[in-house]
Image (cartoon, coloured by chain):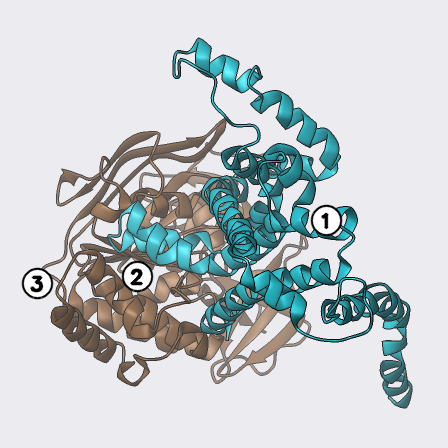
Chain colours: A cyan, B brown
C-alpha cells in the first residue's frame, strides 16, 4: 500500500521530459512572441506600448484579412461537416473489412506530403486542368471556371485535405450509438428523418463539436494550401504574418498580428468547447 | 389503455435466409387476440429473427405477417403500430423519462396537452409518476424497464414485442417484473410476443410457448403440454429436466408400448415410435420417479443427495451407468435409503418415448 502510494506520487516524473520540451520550445517562444508584440518600435528599441495593436486594429484592410480568414475556416469546416457526416455514418455501419479500407482512404490525405497534394490540386483546378476540361466538355460552362487562385478553390482543397479531422471523431461517436435506439424510434412511429434529427444527430453532437474544432483550427492556419491555391491575390492571416516577419522584417507587428489571430481562434474554439461541455454534461453526466 | 380487444397475429409460412444460412424455416404461428406467447429456444434458433420480422426491422425471404388477417409485410416499422421493448431497453439517453414516454405521441403529431396527459397516465400504470423529470441513466434496471414499457404502451400498439426483457435484471427483481408484466398484459388485453432462452420464464408467464430449434418450429402449445407431452426429443430436453433412460421396444399397440429396461419391463401408455426390437429413450421427469429401499423396479446406486428446501434431489446411477435425477418430498422419502436402492417409474407420468438417435 505504502509502495503503491509512493509509486503514484512519483509517477508525475514520467511527464517531466515532455514538460521540459514543451516549456523550452513552446511556452517560452510564445511568451517571447507576446513580449515582442508590445515593442512600440519596429526596430525593437525596448520602448513598450500598444502601438502595434492600434496599428493593426486601425487599418480596415487588416481586419478584412482577419475576417476573410475566419470566414474561410467556417466555409471549409461546414463543407467538411456536410460531406463528412454521411461518410462517417457509412463507415460506422459497414463490415469491419470495408471499414478499414474506407478509413485508410479517409486518412490518405494526411499521409501524403502537403506540397505534393497541393501541386496535384493545382493540376486539377487549373484553367486547363482536368476539372475545367471536364466542365467545358460536358457543356456545363462555355469557358473554364476560375477555381485556382480563388477562394472557392481554397475551400475545395481545404475540404479534401482536412476531411480526416472531421470524419474520425464522427466515426468514433457514431459507432458508440446503440443501433437499437434508431430501431426503437422507428417502432414508436417516427420516420427515418425524425429519427435522425431527434436521436442520431443530438447523440452525435460531441463528435460534431470535436470534428469542427479540429477542422476549423487546421483550416484557418493552413499556410501552404492557402498561399499555393489562393495565389498572391488572396491574403489570409498566416501569409500576412509571414510577409510582415520575413519580407518586411517587422517583427513587433508580425507578433501583434499573431497574437490577435491566436486570440480570435481561441475565442471561437472556447465557445465550441463550452457548447460541447454543456452537451456532454447533458448526455453523460 | 389499449384498444378494448387484442389483435390476432399470424405468421404464415415465414422463411428467412441469410445467404446460405436458414434462420427460419416455414414458420406458422396463429396467435390469438390477447394472448401472451413465448418464442423459446437456444441462441441461434431464429427467435430474434422472427421478432425482427414481426416488428418490420427485417423483411422475410418468404411468407407473410398478418394482424387481424391483414398483411403488414409491406409496411415499414414506423407504420406497423407494433411496440417493442428491447433487451437493453434502448431508452433515449438525452431525453427525460417523460420525453421518452411521449416520444411516439410527438412523432404522431399529437397536441402537447394530450401528450402530457398520456405520459402521466402511462407513468402511473408502471408506477413511475415521480420519475418523469429524470434521465434514463439515473434509473435502476427495473425502473428503466418500466419506462421502456410505458414508452411502448403510450402509442397503444396492436402487438407488444418483448425481447429477452428480464435477462438484464437480477433474480429477485426478475420475478417481480414477470408478475407485473403478466398483470399489465392481462389488464390491457394486448397480444404479446416474448422472446426468451429461459425456459422457466417461458413456462411461468406464457399462455402458449413456441419452441424453436435451428430455425424450425418444434412445438407450439400450452406450457403444461410442452412440459408433460413434448413432441420431440429436443423440446423434451430443452424444457425442464429430463431423464433419458435407454431401453428396447418389446411390443406395441395403438395406445401403449412395453419397454424393456435392463431386467424390467415397463408398459408405457404412449404409442411406440419405432419398430419392435429397436432401441428407444424413455423420458421421465425427476418427479415421476420413486426411490425405495425395498426390492422392486430398477436397481440403482445412489451417487449424491442434495437437500433443496422442501425436497431432496438424488443422483442415481442405473446398472449400465446412466445417471438419473430423482426428486422426492423430504417428508415422503424413505429414510432407510442406503447406497443401493430400487427405482420405480410412474408409467402414466412418462413424458415421452423417442427413437434413440443414431450415434453421430
Question: Image quadrant of residue B141?
Answer: bottom left
Specify the label residue B206 is tagged with. Answer: 2
Point 23% across, 35% down: residue: B74
Q: Nearer the viewer, mark 1 or mark 2?
A: 1
Q: CA distance from mark 1 to mark 2?
A: 77 Å
Which chain is mark 2 on?
B
Q: Nearer the viewer, residue A19 or B179?
A: A19
Q: Nearer the viewer, residue B345 or A219?
A: A219
Q: Nearer the viewer, mark 3 or mark 1?
A: 1
Categorize mark 3 by other alpha carbons within 10 Å: few (<14), some (14-19), many (20+): few
Question: Image quadrant of residue B343?
Answer: bottom right
Categorize mark 2 by other alpha carbons within 10 Å: few (<14), some (14-19), many (20+): many
Judge whether B329 appears above or below A21 on screen.
below
Q: CA distance from mark 3 to mark 1?
A: 78 Å
Q: Position of residue B106 (x, y in %)?
A: 21, 61
Q: Determine the residue located farthest toward the top in the rendered image.
A: A137
Q: Position of residue A175 (x, y in %)?
A: 54, 51
Both labels 3 and 1 in a single chain: no
User: Does the rendering let one see residue B209?
Assistant: no
Q: Nearer the viewer, mark 2 or mark 3?
A: 3
Q: Earlier in the sequence, mark 2 or mark 3?
A: 3
Specify the label residue B4 is tagged with. Answer: 3
Q: Determine the residue located farthest toward the bottom in the rendered image.
A: A2
Point 47% across, 47% down: residue: A78
User: Does the rendering let one see residue A246?
Assistant: yes
Per the image, label 2 sits on a secondary structure element best described as loop
Q: CA distance from mark 2 to mark 3?
A: 21 Å
Both labels 2 and 3 in a single chain: yes
Judge whether B264 appears above or below B303 on screen.
above
Amino acid at each position: 500500500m505504502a509502495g503503491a502510494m509512493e509509486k503514484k506520487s512519483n509517477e508525475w516524473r514520467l511527464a517531466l521530459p515532455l514538460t521540459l520540451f514543451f516549456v523550452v520550445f513552446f511556452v517560452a517562444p510564445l511568451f517571447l512572441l507576446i513580449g515582442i508584440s508590445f515593442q512600440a518600435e519596429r526596430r525593437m528599441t525596448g520602448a513598450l506600448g500598444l502601438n502595434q495593436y492600434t496599428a493593426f486594429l486601425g487599418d480596415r484592410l487588416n481586419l478584412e484579412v482577419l475576417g476573410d480568414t475566419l470566414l474561410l475556416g467556417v466555409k471549409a469546416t461546414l463543407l467538411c461537416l456536410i460531406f463528412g457526416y454521411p461518410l462517417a455514418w457509412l463507415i460506422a455501419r459497414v463490415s469491419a473489412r470495408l471499414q478499414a479500407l474506407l478509413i485508410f482512404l479517409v486518412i490518405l490525405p494526411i499521409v501524403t506530403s502537403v506540397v505534393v497534394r497541393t501541386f496535384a490540386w493545382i493540376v486539377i483546378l487549373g484553367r486547363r486542368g482536368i476539372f475545367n476540361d471536364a466542365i467545358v466538355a460536358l457543356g456545363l460552362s462555355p469557358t473554364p471556371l476560375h477555381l485556382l487562385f480563388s477562394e472557392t478553390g481554397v475551400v475545395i482543397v481545404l475540404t479534401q485535405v482536412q476531411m480526416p479531422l472531421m470524419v474520425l471523431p464522427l466515426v468514433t461517436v457514431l459507432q458508440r450509438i446503440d443501433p437499437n435506439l434508431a430501431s426503437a424510434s422507428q417502432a414508436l412511429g417516427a420516420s427515418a428523418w425524425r429519427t435522425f434529427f431527434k436521436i442520431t444527430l443530438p447523440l452525435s453532437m460531441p463528435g460534431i463539436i470535436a470534428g469542427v474544432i479540429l477542422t476549423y483550427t487546421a483550416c484557418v492556419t493552413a499556410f501552404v494550401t492557402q498561399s499555393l491555391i489562393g495565389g498572391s491575390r488572396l491574403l489570409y492571416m498566416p501569409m500576412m504574418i509571414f510577409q510582415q516577419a520575413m519580407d518586411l522584417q517587422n517583427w513587433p507587428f508580425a507578433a501583434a498580428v499573431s497574437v490577435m489571430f491566436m486570440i480570435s481562434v481561441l475565442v471561437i474554439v472556447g465557445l465550441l468547447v463550452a457548447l460541447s461541455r454543456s452537451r456532454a454534461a447533458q448526455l453523460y453526466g | 389503455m389499449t384498444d378494448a380487444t387484442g389483435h390476432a397475429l399470424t405468421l404464415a409460412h415465414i422463411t428467412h435466409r441469410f445467404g446460405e444460412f436458414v434462420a427460419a424455416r416455414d414458420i406458422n404461428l396463429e396467435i390469438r387476440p390477447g394472448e401472451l406467447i413465448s418464442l423459446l429456444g437456444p441462441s441461434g434458433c431464429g427467435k430474434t429473427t422472427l421478432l425482427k420480422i414481426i416488428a418490420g426491422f427485417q423483411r422475410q425471404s418468404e411468407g407473410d405477417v398478418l394482424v387481424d388477417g391483414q398483411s403488414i409485410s409491406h409496411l415499414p416499422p414506423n407504420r406497423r403500430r407494433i411496440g417493442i421493448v428491447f433487451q437493453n431497453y434502448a431508452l433515449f439517453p438525452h431525453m427525460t423519462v417523460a420525453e421518452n414516454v411521449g416520444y411516439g405521441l410527438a412523432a404522431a403529431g399529437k397536441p402537447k396537452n394530450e401528450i402530457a396527459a398520456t405520459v402521466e397516465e402511462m407513468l402511473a400504470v408502471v408506477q413511475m409518476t415521480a420519475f418523469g423529470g429524470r434521465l434514463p441513466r439515473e434509473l435502476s434496471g427495473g425502473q428503466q424497464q418500466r419506462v421502456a414499457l410505458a414508452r411502448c404502451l403510450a402509442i397503444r400498439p396492436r402487438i407488444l414485442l418483448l425481447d429477452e426483457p428480464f435477462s438484464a435484471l437480477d433474480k429477485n427483481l426478475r420475478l417481480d417484473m414477470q408478475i407485473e408484466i403478466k398483470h399489465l398484459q392481462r389488464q390491457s388485453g394486448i397480444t404479446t410476443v416474448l422472446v426468451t432462452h429461459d425456459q422457466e420464464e417461458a413456462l411461468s408467464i406464457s399462455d402458449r410457448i413456441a419452441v424453436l430449434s435451428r430455425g424450425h418450429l418444434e412445438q407450439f402449445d400450452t406450457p403444461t403440454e410442452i412440459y408433460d407431452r413434448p413432441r420431440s426429443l429436443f423440446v423434451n430436453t430443452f424444457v425442464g429436466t429430463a431423464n433419458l433412460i435407454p431401453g428396447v421396444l418389446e411390443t406395441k399397440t395403438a395406445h401403449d408400448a412395453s419397454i424393456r429396461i435392463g431386467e424390467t419391463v415397463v408398459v408405457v401408455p404412449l404409442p411406440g415410435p419405432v419398430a419392435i426390437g429397436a432401441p428407444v429413450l424413455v423420458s421421465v421427469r425427476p418427479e415421476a420417479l420413486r426411490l425405495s429401499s425395498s426390492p422392486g423396479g430398477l436397481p440403482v446406486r445412489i451417487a449424491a443427495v442434495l437437500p433443496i428446501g422442501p425436497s431432496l434431489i438424488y443422483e442415481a446411477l442405473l446398472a449400465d451407468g446412466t445417471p438419473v435425477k430423482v426428486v422426492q418430498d423430504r417428508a415422503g422419502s424413505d429414510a432407510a435409503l442406503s447406497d443401493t436402492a430400487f427405482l420405480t417409474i410412474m408409467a402414466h407420468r412418462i413424458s415421452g418415448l423417442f427413437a434413440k438417435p443414431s450415434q453421430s
